[in-house]
Image (spheres, helix red, strand yellow):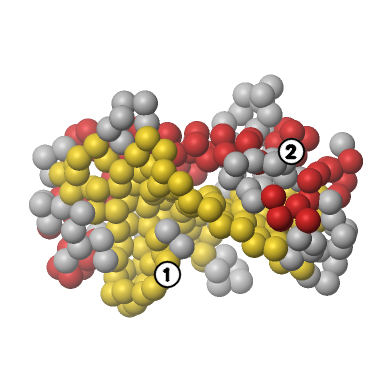
Amino acid sequence: MEGQMRFRPLNEDHAIESVKFSVAFSAGILGPSIMAVEQGHSLWRDSLPARSIADVSVESNGRSGSAPGVLFSFLRPDGLPSWSMAVAVNRIDIECSLYSRWERVWAEARGYFVKVIEILSKSQPGLEIGAVELTVKDVFLATERDYPLNQLLKPSVRLPKFIFEAGQAWHANSGWFEVEANGMQRTLHNLNCDATPDDELTVINISHYQQGGMTSPVNISANRAQLPETLEQRMSTLHKANKQLMVDILKDDMANRIGLGAANNVDI
């Protein structure tokens, strides 16, 4: 319980600041196809009313840039998006910064994917899905300047030992591949963690990016009927891997606090 007093998650019952779902195609989305998606805005205007056609920010595996595309969003009063969907380059990125529970958030994102891919299957039927991606950003707050990190995180093969003795500010980045039991699909993982001191609190960020490759590229036109289930299976696998990673690196009291304990039956 001591660790819970010195650290708290960003939210009352979970630590997730944002989650981003992505579909990456094996080839680029052509300009006319991006325009076709823009013209289909009425299909999701009620939930993503804002729209812009311009250079949109694109981030993958820690690398960011901008490219021509279309961006849809629902903006909060402060002007920042609580939901956004970007279609640019060779990908669809859907990001939520108003996370509640996995089932609700993923169901909404999956609905957007299905609608956009339906449009793309008609305007560019040769497109193939090469990978699905999931990025989860968790935030924890240390309530003391000289916080004992070993009361929030525990030793793990994914975390270097030096961070437990680094003091208030530190950064660690690691990456690895995992091959699924069938031996046919592999997932790239990138774990990026840092601690940023503030006047009164220290913000500890944990960002976990996964890129799950397909056994072979999936044509969005020929496999249109199976795509919802395909996305469901691959994204569910990434979600479970993210939860397991957090269990592996968090102390048990914090894992229990945010619903990741063994006795918790709610799928966060």
Q: Is residue 66 left or right of residue 8?
A: left
* Quarter of the C terminus within the rendering: top right
Task: Quadrant for residue 44, please give it.
Answer: bottom left
Which residue is labeled 1 in the image? 64
Numbered circle sitting on residue 111? none
Q: Is residue 56 above or below residue 90?
A: below
Q: Which residue is mark 2?
A: 251
Residue 237, how many percent across, how many down?
Answer: 42, 34
Q: Position of residue 103 (x, y in %)?
A: 49, 36
Q: Amino acid at mark 2?
A: Lys
Quarter residue 78 falls in: bottom right
First in sequence: mark 2 vs mark 1: 1
Q: Can the viewer see residue 112?
A: no
Q: Label 1 is placed on what type of residue?
A: Ser
Q: Is residue 148 in sight in this rendering? A: yes
Q: Is residue 82 left or right of residue 84?
A: right
- In screen coordinates, is 57 left or right of 249? left
> In the displayed structure, does residue 115 sit left or right of residue 158?
left
Residue 33, x across and y down, in percent:
17, 63
What element does badge 1 sit on? strand
Q: Which residue sits at x=58%, y=45%?
A: 158
Point out residue 80 in the picture as x, y percentages from the top left corner: 55, 69
- The residue at 60%/41% (across/down) is 157
Return the residue nearer the eye: 227 or 167: 167
Residue at coordinates 53% horizontally, 40% vertically from top-left?
242
Toward the viewer: 66 or 125? 66
